[in-house]
Image (cartoon, coloured by chain):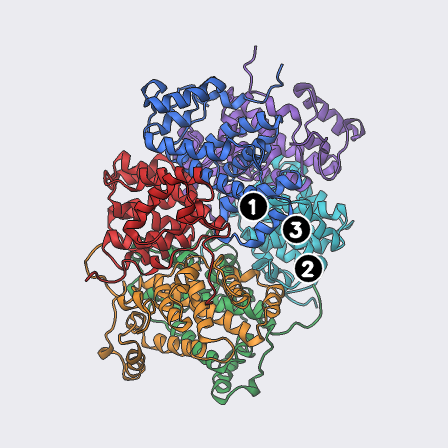
Chain colours: A green, B cyan, C purple, D blue, E red, F orange
Amino acid sequence: MSASPHPVSRFGHVELEDMPDDLRKRIEKITEKSGFVPNVFRALARRPAELRAFLDYHDALMDSDVGLSRAERELVVVATSGANNCTYCVVAHGAILRVRAKDAEIADRVATNPWGVELSPRERAIVDLALLVATDSASLTDAELDDARIAGLSEDEIWDVGAITALFAMSNRLAHLTALRPNPEFFLMGRLPRI
Amino acid sequence: MSASPHPVSRFGHVELEDMPDDLRKRIEKITEKSGFVPNVFRALARRPAELRAFLDYHDALMDSDVGLSRAERELVVVATSGANNCTYCVVAHGAILRVRAKDAEIADRVATNPWGVELSPRERAIVDLALLVATDSASLTDAELDDARIAGLSEDEIWDVGAITALFAMSNRLAHLTALRPNPEFFLMGRLPRI
Amino acid sequence: MSASPHPVSRFGHVELEDMPDDLRKRIEKITEKSGFVPNVFRALARRPAELRAFLDYHDALMDSDVGLSRAERELVVVATSGANNCTYCVVAHGAILRVRAKDAEIADRVATNPWGVELSPRERAIVDLALLVATDSASLTDAELDDARIAGLSEDEIWDVGAITALFAMSNRLAHLTALRPNPEFFLMGRLPRI
Amino acid sequence: MSASPHPVSRFGHVELEDMPDDLRKRIEKITEKSGFVPNVFRALARRPAELRAFLDYHDALMDSDVGLSRAERELVVVATSGANNCTYCVVAHGAILRVRAKDAEIADRVATNPWGVELSPRERAIVDLALLVATDSASLTDAELDDARIAGLSEDEIWDVGAITALFAMSNRLAHLTALRPNPEFFLMGRLPRI
Amino acid sequence: MSASPHPVSRFGHVELEDMPDDLRKRIEKITEKSGFVPNVFRALARRPAELRAFLDYHDALMDSDVGLSRAERELVVVATSGANNCTYCVVAHGAILRVRAKDAEIADRVATNPWGVELSPRERAIVDLALLVATDSASLTDAELDDARIAGLSEDEIWDVGAITALFAMSNRLAHLTALRPNPEFFLMGRLPRI
Amino acid sequence: MSASPHPVSRFGHVELEDMPDDLRKRIEKITEKSGFVPNVFRALARRPAELRAFLDYHDALMDSDVGLSRAERELVVVATSGANNCTYCVVAHGAILRVRAKDAEIADRVATNPWGVELSPRERAIVDLALLVATDSASLTDAELDDARIAGLSEDEIWDVGAITALFAMSNRLAHLTALRPNPEFFLMGRLPRI
């Protein structure tokens, strides 16, 4: 409710041209697709070694269509980031979820109420497991994994759901630590019908 | 993530033409402005007497510029509906907040993390009081009201913050009871620059 | 533990004779039955339009014997007001519950431990649904409504349980906002055998 | 809401005449004052050695006027038993609190909302310390004890508040374990002016 | 992470030779076995009558092999003291559990995550009931006791689980109240193979 | 309480000789120091790309003496893993903390009650910030960072505390997902005086 410019993060940020070569090239490739540099990279670049590990972890878990679909992977991110009240991840990955699921409403509905949102049985099993790992992983037992198995998830899909949730448990906390601000472009992405 | 049509509510709904005359006329006026019948009215019309009381309460608290501004009133609704994980109210009142605050980002940021979102001191005092009334009203003491007074809120503004929060404590629960679905129009409202 | 007089509410109150005519007449009718003006009306009369809507909502949901009995409606109020730690509603509606259920103990037992109190299966289903709507409505799914249906509740009875709970989610918060004090008469009402 | 007789406890009970001599004599003395055998003794008498230890602990902490007054000791019991939702202790010790504080309202107000009830600064310090020990003792630090000291509590009074809270942490759980039912006499005790 | 000496408790302590005769003799017997005076006795001796009742209660519940084995009794203590974050009881009773269960790892695993630790079905039923009584006893119903019965627990074993949990609900809070420090000897006890 | 062998993880594991060359060499170096292969590496090796990113992230944050000392870094891990009830991380990093802090008791005390354990003001500020990021990062504001600054932490030290907490938010969840079992060697490490 203020027109004043907001910083990328409370720890400042690094512009693309000031990043180490390998990181700059890697993030330029992402930028070519999206048209802008997602703020998370500009904020984490304060620590190049950590950003490299973050990107490697992210790519290993999110850039795959084996097992979980890409839309399902984003569903895990948006549901757990909503449960964790992480604005950056809800807005940025909500945008990606809208694009990948080709559904303009799904991200807002999942992020606001991941417990009650209507989903297919497979999606519900994915989200229920993710929410448990996100908010109360110590109580996870074989019984909950069996629920996921009954809904048809394979062992590797269960690993993916749990590991993506774990990665964004980290990512949500980094966003809160740095008061990371979503790029304005994310808010509208995937909301308008493609012409 | 499904193309199948979703019902307005799990208790069905009443179309405008089937409502009692007084309710139909009253809601038609709202529809003239918005261009569509908000689903909350179609769902609650199952019980005309309750819908009348709901509209009266809503108008008494939300259609006033004395004390709290209209944008501030919507800020209370979006912050507490976010804390209550109410999709209908976050999406519908998020749209109104975007319009009234002339800010395309504010609703998503407030709804996702009402505790951490950056606000002016007056807005922060409003939201903090609202969140306390929404989530732990039994522990409210004069000390918390003094915090609001120090931030400049008058006695009537404090009443407004508390009473709007209380009204949407009811409204959020009715939305959850009925599995109320936001109209598709709300999702995009206030996100595009007016031409 | 102090003999000093306590105010009706931290926002002051309006005596019956200073209320607008319609409200005064309406509350006088209630007073004829009870013998005193319940403090909630004196406190909310600061805002006549809000008090009118409150009374309308209350009458629509609480003054009916269709579906839920009047004792069952009060059971919902006392159980959820106990879970919300609302002294005014527990004391005032506890009194009404004692009278309607003709049971001197039920209110204290339900208000103190609504989760564990021994109830009939129908009452337990009513209270369980009410407690879920009161404390975690976002997680309500069809499964919980099915539990209520299996216990014999009709669709309209389910609506009543949910809507009464929602109304007192509002009412409890208004009582906490205003530090509303129960009239001394409520504490003893329904505790003595009628002679 | 049922006229059927309820058992004293879900583990049965022992009548006074079937107790070991020492326990019978000890409880007869209590009964002389109250006019009935409090159900807690009939339920715990299943295990005489445990009942003896319980009575010894109780007498050591509750039957003393050194430091905390007897009314203040009961205030700790009612506040923490309310926070723990223990019907037996709220009803039975609520009765004793009414008698000792000569206040017909205090028990219902403290038990329903121990956080928000209006109390003197000394009583508030006592209740705040008790609630912390009851619900989150692991986070207790010297800072909270200093708050109690500033309100005028001595080291021994602080010990008493903490130890009484601890004793009823046990007692509340035993009442819940056994589904202990308050004697009907407790509900009305201390509510009527003495003639 | 400091070499400075730490006090036994924040309320001081009483050395064995300064205790009343009966307590000194009683604790000397314990000391003969363990080789040192457990700090809990030195701290609680500030109040001899309370310490006597504490010892009596403890002996009645912990020094018996009827029903629950001694290792199972310690399992209840370590699981609930872990859930209550009580360092003294986790360290001291963890030591006893290691000795009684002849298992160098069990105490650390149970105390850190009593919900998820792998146990036999009987042990799991014991720990589940204990955790419910420790953290949410108000919601205990016959259904949970039936789960314990199905796992083979007798009525007296159920009482033991609940009563031991209740006793350590008190004990954990006393340890937190007094900032009770475990004796250094407890940390290593039962970790090394006996030669 | 069972002598049967337990698996490393519920998803199986990979022995050192079956890992990709780069991972095998990297982990062999760790093994040279510790004398055994920590189970976390054998479990995560199911996914070599994820294990590489995990190791990179870990080394970037944990193998540095700039700013936070190594003992302080382990203090963050043990405190937050305790709050998250993660047995693997408490046992394994508890061992490392004992070694680095040269303190046989610190790990058990911090892991069991990170809120109440006595620490130096600098350590308390580190642990308080870590616990907030671990359990409620959405509510983190500049006020909490200012508390850390007042205790003398630099911006980079604050980042380290937050980022280590975030990394172990991930790590704890992976351990729970896989039911990861600590190597027996960790339980005793650092408990005996070096001869």
Residue D67 image-quadrant placement = top right
Q: How crowded is mark 3: few (under 14 residues within 10 Å), some or many (20 or more)?
A: many
Q: Is residue D174 above or below residue F163?
A: above
| Residue E88: x %, y % from top left | 40, 53
Residue D190, given in percent of the width and then of the height, sits at 57, 22
Q: Closer to us: mark 1 or mark 3?
A: 1
Co-location on one chain, circles 1 and 3:
no
Three-letter amino acid code at the position of disc 2: Val
The chain identifier of the residue carrying mark 3 reads B
Pointer 1 chain: D
Tag of residue F97: none
The subunit carrying tag 2 is B
Mark 2 — residue?
Answer: B99
The disc labelled 3 sits on which kind of residue?
Answer: Leu
Element at badge 3?
Answer: helix
Question: Are there few (<14), some (14-19), or many (20+) residues within 10 Å of tag 1?
Answer: few
The quarter holding residue C92 reads top right
**In the rendered image, which residue does mark 3 sit on?**
B129
Task: Compare residues E172 and C177 and report the one nearer the observer.
Answer: E172
**Closest to the observer: E10 or B25?**
E10
**Circle 1 residue:** D155
The residue mark sitting in front, 2 or 1, is 1
- In the image, residue B102 above or below residue C180: below
Of all residues, the one furthest to the top in this rendering is C195
Residue at mark 3 to residue at mark 2: CA–CA distance: 24 Å
Task: Identify the residue shown where x is 63% and y is 57%.
Answer: B95
